[in-house]
Amino acid sequence: MELLSPAGNVEKLYYAYAYGADAAYIGLKKFSLRVKADNFYEDEYKKVIALKEKFPGRKLHCALNISFHNSDIDAFISNIDYFKAYPIDAFIVQDIGLVPILQKYFPDAALHVSTQASCVNREAVKMYKAMGFSRVVLGREASLKEIREIKDAVPDMELEAFCHGAMCIAYAGRCLMSAYLTGRSAQAGACSHSCRWDFDVKLDATKLTPELSRALSESGALVLEEHKRPGEYLPVYQGEDFTAILSSKDIRMIEHLKDMKDAGLDSLKIEGRMKSVYYVALVTRAYRKALDAMEGKISQEEAEPFIAELENVSHRESGTGFYYNRSEADITVSGATDSRYELSAEISEEISEEERDELFKKARNFDQERKKELEEMHPEARKARLKDYELHPDKNPPLLPEKEGWFMYRITALNMIHPGDEIEFISPDTVSIKPEKDSWLLVNPENGTLRSWVCDGHDCILYTKTKLQKGSLIRMEDKDYKSGVIRDSGR
């Protein structure tokens, strides 16, 4: 089975591939249901082409899954030449008006039916096949039993389904709640995730008999009031086959991959183009290892530590969705996602021997210039300068020491890191490494001195005795994290 991971930008596309995805799906500006994701634009196609060359054999799927209005169709056609620059293997669409356009301008690209089309039966799959689609991304409401029936009825149609991530409460995401409350339509890619807000039911149910409670729930007299929107009431109505408007559980099918394969699925999709690099990397890695174990490439015991790391990425309570029993999907949860870790830095390429030698040379030159400056000072000025150094050590940073057997890597810091912090290295094939505090240093590449801290926006080189795999990341435990406590997202 193909493992398909989300990529909200070029950076995430790299980590999707590096951590084991067979394919990744992206969105292009204005034509994707995740307009708040970074998506892809301008000359980023050059970086995407380079990535596909770096990871030969990996596929690229492009989501064009908004509901197109006439103006959207016109805008898309006017940008055709730009889209052609991307090495797109397949387009994911829900609007069938795009089919003849894509077939005309992208004859070599496959067409995939988006989950937004809510395709959950064999007759619809047959229709899409006749239209020229080669794959259907099934609606999340399809059970494994139904998927097997569809595959048996249309065996030469590829079937894709979600294996991990958030689920909408509305049928395959066809929700109007966000548009109603905020004017941001989910079908235009601007969902505000209103279903996950914190609401209060404005009634004391303990004072009701079961009969009266049921009568009220069916009457529409109950209302919800969201914490940050006092005075705005939403009616709650319990019908024959549904109950609440609140958020569903996330999907987690990593323990059931064989069942998904036996159902006839060709591709497993991870939700999350708006999720972080850290999320994309660890979730992709967990499913890669689980699939490798299922296929006999590694043992289940080898895969288990990677699977356990799913608890260390942001997530809500999870379940199996509609795959086995719809009652599991009917259970609602609330609140934001959270994680005990924060991504501190991304580690890029290792420094070459030439660059390494140049850095040591910079350190020696800096030291000589510092000494010369002090020597040429008036004694009183020198005394004052040395006192200033004593009070403000950052003004007199130590030099980069030469250590045998250590390695240098460029890093992009995302959060504050100090030497001596308890950091962890994670990589595509290593669950985590906790280096000793004296086994790594932070280096200023401009002058070869040691940094006492680094954060976003500071050029930095990691000097460490640990040999790191390409695509490694640095994480630290979030000191503000409390298990079971959902923090205010500032929505």
Image (cartoon, grey):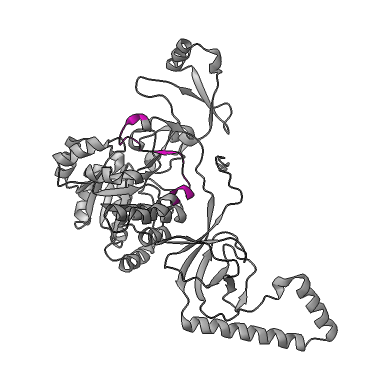
Q: Foreground residue, 101 or 123? A: 123
Q: State how many labels appear.
A: 0
What is the x, y in percent for residue 106?
22, 56
Residue 324 magenta: yes
In magenta stretch: residue 373: no
Residue 28 appears in view: no
62 w.r.t. 187: above or below: below
Residue drawn 42% across the image and 16% down it: 218
Tell me residue 267's x, y (percent): 27, 49
> Residue 95, located in which quarter of the rendered image?
top left
- x and y percent of residue 473 in the render? 48, 62
Say if 83 sits above or below 237 in the image.
below
Whether residue 438 sits left or right of residue 381 in the image: it is left
Q: Residue at x 48, y 66 (%)?
A: 347
Q: Residue at x 14, y 39 (%)?
A: 153
Is residue 472 shown left or right of residue 70? right
Residue 477 visible to the viewer:
yes
Q: Quadrant of the C terminus?
A: top right
Left/right placement of residue 436 relative to residue 312 reads right
| Region in magenta | 309-327
